[in-house]
């Protein structure tokens, strides 16, 4: 008897909360009684017309009202895209992650992976970077790595996807960016005379990104860093490796030297 009363009270409270929610949310109140097909169609139409704020509200009602089925699955993926278009990457990424983890066999998984990679690839980490022309390598390496992993998974799992060619192109850009980022950090460590740290960053370029154009400088940095540490044998041996792999390197005649940039060139990326 007591359990029955508790269930009855819970049911009444739930209905009360739902009714309050409907009255407080105009979109929820407007769409009350709509079929799943109508809800999805309206949300998709608003998205197509770039009315992102309203489309987001409709997709959220769809997810809450009809949490199962093909419309819910596609709606969740569309919601992630709508968040991104509405400059809400912080909401878009967990939404697309939710889709990937919840619906791993969905027919649009290739697009979901592409969207995750693309959002991380384009995420500029703040307003100032939009004006400064911030380079990929100067961004949070976590986001760059997430983009790389998403695109790599897409290419490996769905090689025939229509998104694969662009993903491959972006992978190449990301690899160069990751390599360049390590070089930036190695240069910085050289500037503060943290030679072991500089060697480590340079070694990361050589091992992890051997086909990028920054291997030459990575070897040149190591030559100088080993010399500064008094480890002459390693300095000489590394110079030999540099000569073998880059016989025309400018660092064979003139050792690598840290160059400071004027303040107005701080954000200039390398070409």
Image: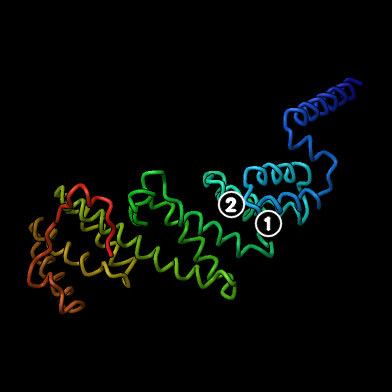
Farthest-out residue, right: 1
Q: Which quadrant of the rendered structure holds the C terminus?
A: bottom left
| Quadrant housing residue 15 | top right
Q: Residue at x 92, y 21 (%)?
A: 1
Q: Residue at x 38, y 53 (%)?
A: 141
Compared across the picture, whether 141 is left or right of 228 comes to right
| Quadrant housing residue 26 | top right
Compared across the picture, whether 234 is left or right of 56 comes to left
Q: Is disc 2 placed on a helix, strand or loop?
A: helix
- Judging by the rendered image, the residue that carries numbered circle 1 is 103
Farthest-out residue, front: 49
Nearer to us in this view, 250 or 32: 32
Of callouts 2 and 1, the N-terminal one: 2
Q: Residues within 10 Å of mark 2 (few under 14, many from 20)?
A: some
Compared across the picture, whether 119 is left or right of 222 comes to right
Q: How is the image coloured?
A: rainbow
- Report how far apart the C-alphas of labels 2 and 1 lie in the structure: 10 Å
* x and y percentages locating residue 136 in the rendered image: 37, 57
* x and y percentages locating residue 14 in the rendered image: 80, 28
Q: Residue at x 21, y 51 (%)?
A: 188
Q: How many marks?
A: 2
Query: Is residue 115 depicted above or below 60 in this figure?
Result: below
- Judging by the rendered image, the residue that carries numbered circle 2 is 97
| Quadrant housing residue 160 | bottom right
* x and y percentages locating residue 2 in the rendered image: 88, 20
């Amino acid at each position: 008897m007591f359990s029955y009363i508790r269930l009855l009270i819970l049911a009444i409270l739930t209905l009360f909360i739902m009714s309050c929610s409907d009255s407080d949310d105009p979109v929820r109140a407007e769409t009350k009684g709509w079929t799943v097909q109508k809800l999805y169609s309206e949300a998709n139409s608003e998205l197509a017309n770039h009315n992102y704020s309203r489309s987001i509200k409709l997709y959220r009602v769809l997810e809450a009202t009809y949490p199962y089925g093909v419309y819910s699955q596609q709606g969740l993926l569309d919601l992630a895209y709508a968040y991104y278009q509405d400059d809400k990457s912080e909401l878009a990424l967990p939404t697309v992650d939710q889709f990937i983890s919840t619906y791993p066999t969905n027919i649009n998984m290739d697009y979901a992976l592409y969207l995750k990679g693309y959002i991380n690839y384009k995420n500029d980490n703040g307003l100032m970077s939009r004006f400064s022309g911030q380079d990929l390598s100067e961004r949070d390496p976590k986001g760059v790595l997430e983009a790389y992993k998403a695109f790599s998974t897409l290419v490996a799992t769905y090689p025939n996807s229509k998104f694969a060619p662009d993903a491959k192109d972006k992978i190449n850009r990301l690899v160069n960016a990751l390599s360049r980022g390590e070089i930036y950090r190695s240069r910085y460590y050289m500037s503060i005379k943290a030679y072991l740290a500089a060697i480590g960053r340079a070694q990361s370029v050589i091992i992890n990104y051997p086909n990028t154009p920054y291997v030459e400088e990575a070897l040149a940095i190591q030559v100088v860093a080993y010399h500064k540490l008094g480890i002459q044998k390693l300095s000489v041996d590394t110079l030999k490796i540099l000569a073998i792999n880059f016989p025309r390197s400018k660092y064979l005649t003139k050792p690598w030297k840290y160059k400071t940039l004027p303040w107005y060139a701080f954000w200039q990326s390398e070409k």
